[in-house]
Image (spheres, helix red, strand yellow):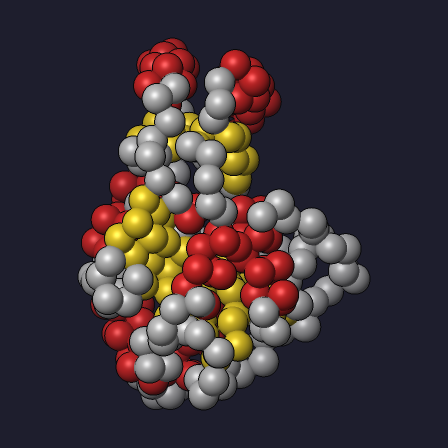
Amino acid sequence: MTAQIIAFPDTLPVAPPLEPDGCALFLDLDGVLAPIVARPDDVGPDPRRTLILRRLAERLGRRVAIISGRTIDQVTAITENTIAAVAGVHGLERRNVLGDVVSAVPDPELGEATAVLKALARAQPQLTVEEKGLSVALHYRALPSACEAVREAARRLEAATSLVLQEGDMVAELRTAGADKGQALEAFMAEWPFHGARPIFVGDDLTDEDGFLAAQSSGGYGVLVGSHRQTAARYRLADVDAVLDWLQAAAIGDSA
């Protein structure tokens, strides 16, 4: 699915209270459930988040999935295996609530791209390479001035290979061609226990626009986390803390 970002007014309304009955919830991880940090490996489990997710899955009858750019294994570790349904690497791998996993076949040209990005990182240690098996990402959050150089190198690699460039928040990622976050949502919605529910997709990055559109086309909506921008989302939450408060109110009440 190719996202078509819809222009909205300068402000989006705050997301209404989450009504667990009849909805299916799809959550990005970084920037939504966990703060974005310079080094992806620095994100780990959080007791409050774990409790909220566990109770939320119970309250929604397991109709909760995490759809992330991270791998399934990374998501599982960070969330302490509280959510059974996970799509990783932007939808290229997917685990349903029964534990069945489907995955794309890695593009053979990933090795070449990884070597180039590692060479860039050796030249500038503030850049961080993240290998995900189905993709490779170069993070430049610790060196924002490298943005144009990183993106130019990634665009050249995309042009020279069959890889797909996925640009995100302070990261350029080259990935195996295949499913996106919207298609991952659609795959979950075709299965138990999601089938027939109203999808709500919560995300912060441009990669989440496909999820917003897929939720909208299935009768639901998207929630943008962070600063206002052009988006297909219908509502907004300010930051990770606001997301966790919103989820907590639905899952276990405001007193936790």
Q: Tell me if I can see residue 177 in this picture.
A: yes
Relative to 209, say whether 59 is above or below. below
Residue at 42% in and 48% down:
91
Relative to 137, say whether 209 is above or below. below
Front residue of this view, candidates 69 and 244? 69
Residue at 34% in and 47% down:
93
Residue 137: quarter of image: top left
Residue 74 picture location, percent across and down: 26, 48
Residue 180 picture location, percent across and down: 49, 47
Relative to 42, say whether 196 is above or below. below
Relative to 65, say whether 172 is above or below. above
Front residue of this view, candidates 118 and 24? 24
Residue 96 picture location, percent across and down: 30, 62
Residue 67 picture location, percent across and down: 41, 56
Residue at 61% in and 74% down:
219
Residue at 45% in and 55% down:
184
Q: Quadrant of the C terminus?
A: bottom left
Q: Tell me if I can see residue 236 in this picture.
A: no
Is 179 on the left or on the right of 46, as rendered? right
- Looking at the rendered structure, the number of numbered marks drawn on it comes to 0
Is 123 on the left or on the right of 58, as rendered? right
Q: Residue furthest front?
A: 190
